[in-house]
Amino acid sequence: MREPTTESILDALRGVTDPERGGDVVSLGMISGVVIKNGNVGFAVEVSPSDGIRKEPLRKACEKAVEAVPGVLSVTAVLTAERQPPAAAAAPPQQQPGSTGHTHAPGRSGRGSTQQRLDLPNVRAIVAVASGKGGVGKSTTAVNLALGLAALGRRVGILDADVFGPSMPRMLGAVGRPETTPGQKLRPMEAWGIVAMSMGFLVAEETPMIWRGPMVMSALEQMLRDVDWGELDVLIVDMPPGTGDAQLTMAQRVPLAGAVIVSTPQDIALLDARKGLNMFRKVEVPVLGIIENMSYFLCPHCGGRSHIFGHGGAREEAAKLGCDFLGEVPLHMAIRETPDGGRPIVASEPESEHAKAYLEIARRVDAKIAETLGEQARRKPRIVVQ
């Protein structure tokens, strides 16, 4: 079967009409970012910022039209409000008397914010697992932390928020595509007793996601809002590495109960971890603590420890920054090999010393979640009717 072309995709989309604007989505300039790889198609439907979820039927109509194109195996369309309407773009922001002219980024305080925060009423707590830089084992930590919480009896889900480098399908050994529920939501994939959603379930593993920031955020919001997560005690969000727009917007738009920072012991990783921690604090997201990954190498032959990347740096950094140190995880081949093979060590080798390290961290995170939720509940105003 021949690979579909950009022109064949656009031809199909010319048959989709925006009923409010009275034209097809291509002629109206609403389609951008078309990506085609081995029959997997992705594109963005650009709408007005004021339209938001109201255009969801139009997005689904675009997906349905492209699915009918010969050679198309999967379609991922996302809504993005990158383009600002001319009237809005021309109007300067209104300043209050005595203001300095500075504007506030939309955040937890809501000051200056026009964005509505996402609400997942059936999810008790959402916890971000983040790192200031890549290559520190954040995703491996996230998946084993999720499985550790499940081992404690919690109902757990995991969202792979790294759109450009999704790893959860491979780490969990989950294959296939999510099904659609009668309510037109995606049913998350299940593996090892937890549920998961990732862009990796929607596009082929080798497909590059050549998307701009607003398109990425639209995709993440849809994976939160349009997925039937069910009743969960904890939803772990495996954040992209760094402190860019995607990370900041996720921290502001998602009601996070807290964040866990992953770092290795060396100074350069700790420097970036500090930036990540400070980002969450600026948007008033509680930092549950720091995990030191690759803390030491335990020789499988003699049992001796080698501090390849140094040791104890994350513990010292946690003390300096006034947050909890959640634990250390060794550098070991089994920890690397098991998720690569779709068998995370907490699930596949629960009695191993390495799994026990993750389980102890999960206990501490579970306690911190309960503590944080309790504090948030106490801060809520109470209305007493006499």
Image: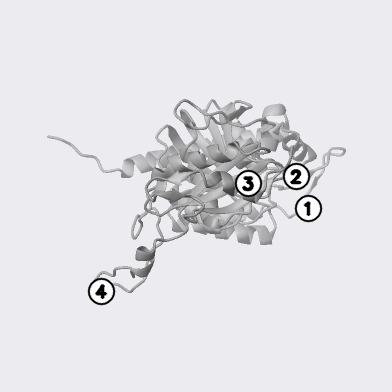
Residue 325 in sight from this viewpoint: no
Callout 3 amino acid:
Ser
Q: Of residues 244 and 67, which is closer to you in this image? A: 67
Q: Is residue 30 left or right of residue 302?
A: left
Where residue 345 sits, quadrant-wise, is: top right
Disc on res. 326: none
Residue at figure coordinates x 60%, y 25% from the top left? 193
Which element type, helix, strand or loop, lies under badge 1? loop
Q: In the rendered structure, are the residues bearing label 4 and label 1 in contact, judged by CB atoms less than 8 Å apart?
A: no
Residue 207 in sight from this viewpoint: yes
Q: In the rendered structure, are the residues bearing label 1 and label 3 in contact, judged by CB atoms less than 8 Å apart?
A: no
How crowded pointer 1 is (Cα within 10 Å; few <14, some 14-19, many 20+) is rated as few
Q: Nearer the viewer, mark 1 or mark 3?
A: 3
Callout 1 amino acid:
Ile
Point out residue 61 in the picture as x, y percentages from the top left corner.
49, 39
Disc on res. 98: 4
Which element type, helix, strand or loop, lies under badge 4? loop
Residue matched to label 1: 308
Residue matched to label 2: 331
Disc on the earlier residue, 3 or 4: 3
Whole-angstrom CA distance, mark 3 to mark 4, is: 56 Å
Whole-angstrom CA distance, mark 1 to mark 2, is: 9 Å
